[in-house]
Amino acid sequence: MLFRWNQKRERKMSCILSVLMVVIMLLSGCAGGGTSGKNESTDGTENATNVSGTEASIDAVGGTVAEETTEEATEAVREYIVCLDAGHGGLRGAISPLDGRYESHDTLRLTLAIQRELEKYDHVTVIMTRTEDVHVENKQRPQMANDAGADLFVSIHRNSNTTGDKGGVEGWIDKNNPPESREVGEMILAAMEAVGVTANAGIKTGSWDEPDVNYTVIEYAKMPAVLLEVGYLNYAEDNRLFDENLDAYAKATAKAIFTWLTQKK
Ligand SMILES: [Zn+2]
C-alpha cells in the first residue's frame, strides 16, 4: 500500500516536475531569447561602457578620497620654512643724511621683529641670514634659504634716493615676474599700508636701474622671493613711521606671510 502510494506519488510528482520544468524552460527561454536576441549588441556595448564607467567612477572616487586624505594629512603636519634676510650688515648699506641712521641697523631691527612675530605661528620655522651686525655676502643669503628648502625668502631693506622728496614702501621681485613672489609681496605691502605708510609704490621687477637685472639676493633664491624697501632713509616722515610702527609692521608682515603660506597650494 505504502509502496503503491509511493509509486503513484512518484509518478504524480515527476509529472508535476516535468510540467514545471517545461514551464520554467519556456519562461526562461522566452525571457533569455528576448533579451539576448533583441538587445545583445546594445547590451554588450552598454555593459562594457557601464562596467568600465563604474570602475572609472570608483577609481576616480577612490583616487579623490585617497588624495584628499593624503592632502589633509599633509596639511595637518605641513611645516613652513621662511628665510628672513636683514639687508646689509657690518656697517654696509646706506646711511641717512637726516639722522645718520644706518640702513643695516634698521633692517636688522625690523627683521628680528618679524622673526619674533612669525615664530608665534604654529608650523613655521624661521631661518635668519644674520641676527647681528655682521657682513654676509649677498649670494650667501639666498643660499641659506636654498639649503634649508625654504618656502619663501624675504629680504628687508630701506630705500634712499638723491632727491629726498618722496617716501613710501615698495618691493622687488625676479625680472620674470613670478606670480607667487608678486602675490606675497603685494600681500605684505598691503599689510604695511594698512598700518600706515606715506605711499605704496607696489611690486616691481628686476632692479631700480636695470629692469633686466635682478638683485643678487633675488637672483639666487630658488623659491618665491621678494626684496622689500621699507620707507626712505632720507625722508623724515618715513623714518618717523618706521620707528613708530616697527612692531606693527612686523606683526602685519608676519600675518601676511603666514596667510600666504597657508593659502598657497
Ligand atoms: Zn639696501
Image: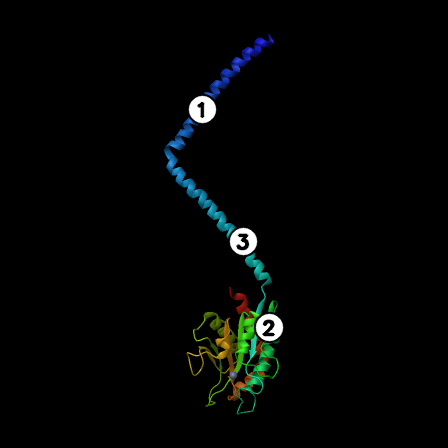
Q: Name the mark nearer the viewer: 1 or 2.
A: 2
Residue 70 horizontal side relative to residue 213, left or right: right
Tell me which numbered mark, 2 or 3, is placed earlier along the sequence.
Answer: 3
Q: Residue 126, which numbered label?
A: 2
Find the distance from the CA under tag 1 to the CA under tag 2: 80 Å
Disc 3 residue type?
Ala
Disc 2 residue type?
Val
Residue 261 position in % (x across, y down): 54, 68
Find the distance from the CA under tag 2 to the CA under tag 3: 32 Å
Tell me which numbered mark, 3 or 1, is placed earlier along the sequence.
Answer: 1
Q: Residue at x 54, y 53 (%)?
A: 66
Disc 1 residue type?
Met
Looking at the rendered structure, the secondary structure element under dot 3 is helix
Can you identify the residue that label 3 sits on? Answer: 66
Tell me which numbered mark, 1 or 2, is placed earlier along the sequence.
Answer: 1
Looking at the rendered structure, the secondary structure element under dot 2 is strand
Work out whether residue 258 or residue 166 is closer to the camera in this orientation and state it: 258
Instruction: Specify whether residue 256 is in view.
Output: no
